[in-house]
Image (cartoon, helix red, strand yellow):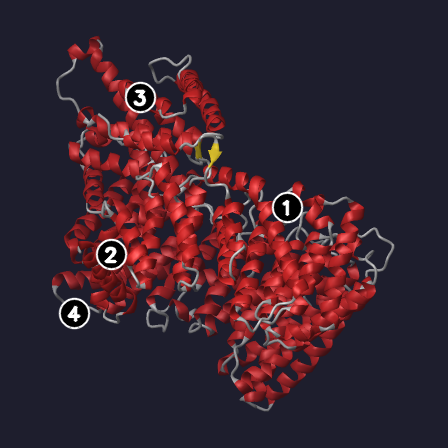
Amino acid sequence: MADIEQISQLEVLCKQLYETTDAEQRAQAEKALVSFTNSPDCLSKCQLLLERSSSAYAQLLAATTLTKLICRPSTVLPLEQRIDIKNYVLNYLASRPKLPTFVTQALIHLQSRITKLGWFDSEKDNWVFRNIIDDVSKFLQGSVDHFVIGVQLMAQLVNEMNQPDTVRPLTKHRKIASSFRDSVLFEIFNLACNLLKQASKEGVNFNDENKHALMTQLLRLTHNCLTFDFIGTSTDESTDDNCTVQIPTGWRSAFLDFSTVNLFFDLYKSLPPTLSPLALTCLVQIASVRRSLFNNAERAKFLSHLVNGVRGILESPQSLSGANNYHEFCRLLARLKSNYQLGELVKVENYSEVIALIAKFTIESLQVWQFAPNSIHYLLTLWQRMVASVPYVKATEPHLLEVYTPEVTKAYITSRLESVSAILRDGVEDPLEDKGMVQQQLDQLSTIGRCEYEKTCTLLFQLFDTSAQKYQELIRTNTTGFELATQEGRLTWLVLIIGAQIGGRVSFTSAEEHDALDGQLVCRVLQLMNLTDAKLPQGGCEKLDLAMLSFFEHFTKIYLGNQVQKSSKLYRTLSQVLGLQDESTVLSVFIGKIITNLKYWGQSEPIIAKTLKFLSELSVGYSSVRKLVKLDAVQFMLSNHTSDHFPFLGVNGTFSVGDMRCRTTFYTALGRLLMVDLGEDEDRFETFMMPITSAFEFVGAQLANANDGAVWNEAETKRTLIGLARDLRGIAFAFNNKPSFLMLFEWIYPSYTPILQRAIELWYHEPIVTTPILKLMMELVQDRSERLHFHVSSPNGILLFREISKMFVAYGSRMLTLGADIPKDQVYPMKLKGVSICFGMLKAVLSGSYVNFGVFQLYGDTSLEEVLQMFVKLLLSIPLSDLLDYPKLSLNYYSLLESLAKDHMAFLSGLEPQVFLHILSSISEGLTALDTVVCTGCCATLDSIVTYLFKRISKSAGKKAKKENDNFPSIMVVPPAILQQMLSTVLNIIMFEDCRNQWSMSRPLLGLVLLNEDYFTELRESIISSQPVEKQEDMRMCFKNLMDGIEANLRSKNRDRFTQNLSVFRRDVNDSLKTTNNSSVVSSLSSTDMMS
């Protein structure tokens, strides 16, 4: 009776969870079901639900709960129990073939997961979870419903075996996947192909839902087999067009039998549109089979069958009208070139007909620009790779690319131009809005267009001249509206395409004639720029000006710098047409455009940001920056960087405060330009800083008024201060030598640092103000090129640290007052982001080696003690989970802790025991972090702590202990359990996980072993006893070899010996575990984690 009540109650909860619209009721139901899944008797209750419940939601709950239960690392179910669950699920599916789809899928997922996790489990020399084919064959002999379930079981299992999980380390996953691949996968693939051949021969009524579902599952099963990660490369799906399917050599027979290839082309023709894309996805993988699977003759035959199949589809392209078919077919075409050489393709029979059909298909696809735009990438990839291969083709057969690539180029260009009027007229989506896709396509076109480059340029000349003449006429007659917008849109595309074509120049294949053609293209764009700039006072076209900047970037990359000869025909053309004789005159044009944009486009954040990015790139080049500083326009910028000339610098601009970050880029570029001839010229520096000095004086006066209770403009003061912080950060970043940085430091200290300090105190709760100021201070303590190594008699390093200390303490003490008032979703921007910057700032100054921290205590200066105590208080106010949840905070905290452990152990060891325990707990959490940098930093920190502790203990046991006082630091009373847990964690990672930083892990391990010798002995015996009897002696020898020749000290020579031993130990342990189920070993290790 109680069971029935429990089932009824769970059914009600499941219904509330999945069906109710009341959020509170759903949350309560979810909470109750979570407690159910964590209850000790949930296994028996799940069985009851499956047997007696009629609710599909309850059955789903049971299946998902069982899946979670078998995946818990902390709870390893006995082998007999897992076998029972496996058999129960199979019988349940067999007796209930018409369950709701989501229940069936959940049960199949459970079955595949339990099979994977138990892959290496054996009972009486029998691999109990590997009899997959036998289990599935019973379903394949039943009804259509049973047949579908059988195929689903195989498809899900293949997929499960291919996916790394969170339960096992990656190395364990690869061992399971490799064993599955070698023992079962080929048999499953053959079975799937045979079933598809049988269905294709007999014919299938696709109007029958069951038959349709059956073919769907068979195709998915085949696709899962072909996409299996055969060699453990874990390729990213976003780069699938570069991957090769690493079919094992044992599968050769399936692909030498060309009926497999033909099968999927036949299926594509016979299947309905809902299924035919699946056949094409399989063909995409088949076309990507590794080249080395065949010899030359076999590969040629295989390629011939593929090309003939493609030809058949192109000759009857009606089914390609479906978006899914079209997309997969484009992918198939791209794979032909990614996996085969152009020299092999041209030798295929009927190549000339096939390349003509592909060209026709490409041209038609480009003309229909709105249909499946994401598929165009694959067609352009095919042509790009073929054109790029032309210089390397040794075959005598003609490749005919000179015939078809000009047509493809023309189709792309004209279709983009024709799209402009349609977009303006019909309001459809503009392809230019997707900047990533456009950039990718233009990069591909730049290679395609370089084939028969004269034809490409002739087309661009004609189209550009026509649009430019119409545009000039419209401007002359003051015509606005549709016609003007159409020409601006067409010119935007043309400028982008010209920029990409220039960027596609390859030095070793470009002829001088091509440089001359580039010169004519550049002249046209620069003439257009003059036309558009003259119109800017009345308004401009944002997209066209962004295209101009993109063009400048391409030109700079190719034709500015040392890589291009000054005798290039491009400069001859520019000289003849525009009077631009050399790089300096071209740079003057670019700087003029930059100034024009900054003057007239102050309201456009995209243009300002891109313009400043371009200026910053120009200021980095060694030769270009020296030519730039000689230009009058650059000297004008250095002397007049005010809002009068550059409106985006104004405090009353329309930029939001968040968009003011581009000012940092501007002043970084100006700083680099100023530094070229600055030397130690303080007068020039003072002149440059005058606008910033005036702004600081204004802020200081306003804050003084605020302190005195007088009238002040808070909004303007705040905005000015934010801009100043961003400006100074840019200058500080650029000033990376001692003389320039010293001038900056003496300018800012002590005149203006109190203003920054006061701002932090006043607006500590407004991150929009505090973040720029804290980032400025963080930049000031970065020792770039040893700029902070002041003269031996200079106190500047100490003075800088004291300012950092004051700001850190002021900000931190106020952050602590906020307490728990901050909403959860605002914790990072309101508190943790600023704290993270403070941690990074403190780490930079502590590890910079330009401050002697010993003098603070010597002379009674509390700056160091105060900032370290504030660090501890802030740390205790942050939950441990947050330290790892926010990557920037995590990185800054652990790097700071590493620096403290390295150089300030006296401080750490003097902390209260509970505080030190908190820090050790954070290190323990960090050891298992996914970020390798964090994990490595934790190892270094732990090594410093363990070394210090070991030395103190060794020292206290010696004769010197009698002479010392009894004030032992708190580190000496650390509970043994915490260090024992860390020893267990590090050993577990090294033995059983994919340890990516083995050297770092080895450093603290020796100290942990020496501090916990008794525990290490217990742990070692526990691990050895958990092994099968025949493996115990091997494991004992591994541990013996690990400590062979190791002495009870932490000297460098001894550490290095231990590190070498550990590498051998890890290798030997992995070899020993290859044929052993190590779940019991891991269980043993985790169960003794907290032994004391």
What residue sits right under mark 4 in the picture?
Answer: 711
Residue 940, given in percent of the width and then of the height, sits at 36, 31
Q: CA distance from mark 4 to mark 3?
A: 70 Å
Of 671 and 814, the residue lying toward us:
814
What residue sits right under mark 2 in the picture?
Answer: 33
Quadrant for the C terminus in the image: top left
Residue 165, given in percent of the width and then of the height, sits at 42, 46
Q: CA distance from mark 1 to mark 3?
A: 45 Å
Q: CA distance from mark 4 to mark 2?
A: 60 Å
Quadrant for the N terminus in the image: bottom left
Please state which of the two labelled residues, at mark 4 or mark 1, is closer to the viewer: 1
Please state which of the two labelled residues, at mark 1 or mark 3, is closer to the viewer: 1
* 1043 versus 842 height, above or below: above
Q: Amino acid at mark 2?
A: Leu
Tell which circle, 3 or 2, labels the residue nearer the N-terminal end.
2
* 720 versus 1034 height, above or below: below
